Image: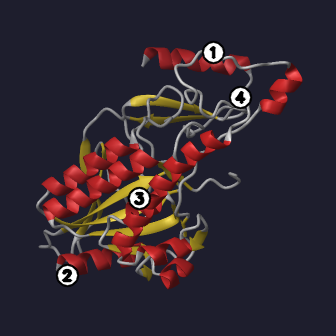
Amino acid sequence: MRWTWIALPLLAATGCFNAITIAPTRVSSPLEQITVVEPQKFFTRARVAIIDVEGMILNAKLDGGLFTAGENPVSLFRERLDQAAKDHRVKAVVLRINSPGGGVTASDVMYRDLCRFREHTGKPVVACLMDVAASGGYYLAMGCDHVIAHPTTVTGSIGVIMSLYNAYGLCQLLGITSEPIKSGPNKDLGNPARLMTEPERAILQGVVNQFYDQFVTVVARGRRMPEEQVRVIADGRIYSGVEACKLGLVDKVGYLEDAFHTAMTLAGVEDAAVVAYDRGPGYRGSIYAALPQLPGEMKVKLDLPGMPGAAAPSAAGFFFLWEPGAR
């Protein structure tokens, strides 16, 4: 903590930043229950847990800002599911998704965890799609019993992308050549300093096709649709919540309150308290509340020109990701 406070005047002395925010955060503490909305009836013991999935889905610690380690979305998701599974008063879960997707493996791991949760606990899970629930975010929703989208939700983007960039022309202009020492002809597959051959492209396309087939299978199973029907609408495009409902990609157009009512109906309870699992004690004023600020380690976030924000996906990877502008 001491070195954090020392750093502040040093940074201020440089005069090179235009904003500073000090926000307390603690990412090493265990999850604790936080009541979001008190039950309407005094003797109600049933609970519905709300679990948030926000931002990029990656099996890595995302950047939490300067001086803080951040969270691993995959690990945090499993922790929250475990808490909901252990609490016998939790009768159902609402999964609130606001994500453009992320890594193929991370998305699939979270999907499998969700399927196992439903299988082992018998507790229904209702997905509520927020601003964006595309690609890997939509993939995760397929592990739920019921899917509700806001009318303004951006969803779909069913597909796989591997973003590669070629700088061969620039290397030629600058007189730069790539001379890797490799064990096989395909070991430097995707080398940006040379042109890709057709056999190399076929190798990568084959992997993309395999992951795409897996995505289609998951959607077909989750939506109870023939795979041929899924493939017609799974060309990578996005849909609004209203369009997705017409196509059968979601069950209903509605709001977060509708998701909780549906969850209680599926669980067979008439009334329930809404709870969340966050790090540290606190209280959320409503079901739309953001995560509370927590005491603990000091996090200093600087709004500096050119400083990166959250962790971005590596170019060398396969993603279930809505990436506007990607080619």
Rendered location of residue 34, percent (x, y):
28, 54
- Of label 1 and label 2, which has the lower sequence position? 1
- Of label 3 and label 1, which has the lower sequence position? 1
For the N terminus, the image quarter is top left
Q: State the residue in front, 201 or 7.
A: 201
Which residue does the image show at 45% across and 63% down from the upper left?
A: 138
- Of label 2 and label 3, which has the lower sequence position? 3
For numbered disc 2, what is the local secondary structure? loop
Left or right: where does residue 118 sit relative to residue 147?
Answer: left
Q: State the residue in front, 204 or 286.
A: 204
Q: CA distance from mark 1 to mark 2?
A: 57 Å
- Are circles 4 and 3 on residues that touch, CB within 8 Å? no
Q: Nearer the viewer, mark 2 or mark 4?
A: 2
Q: Write down the residue under mark 2.
A: 270
For numbered disc 3, what is the local secondary structure? helix
Q: Nearer the viewer, mark 1 or mark 2?
A: 2
Q: Give the label on residue 124, or none.
A: none
- Of label 4 and label 1, which has the lower sequence position? 1
For numbered disc 1, what is the local secondary structure? helix
Q: CA distance from mark 4 to mark 3?
A: 46 Å
Q: Write down the residue under mark 3.
A: 214
Q: Write down the residue under mark 4.
A: 17
Task: Please determine whether, in this image, residue 87 is positioned above or below residue 5.
Answer: below
Q: State the residue in front, 74 or 325.
A: 325
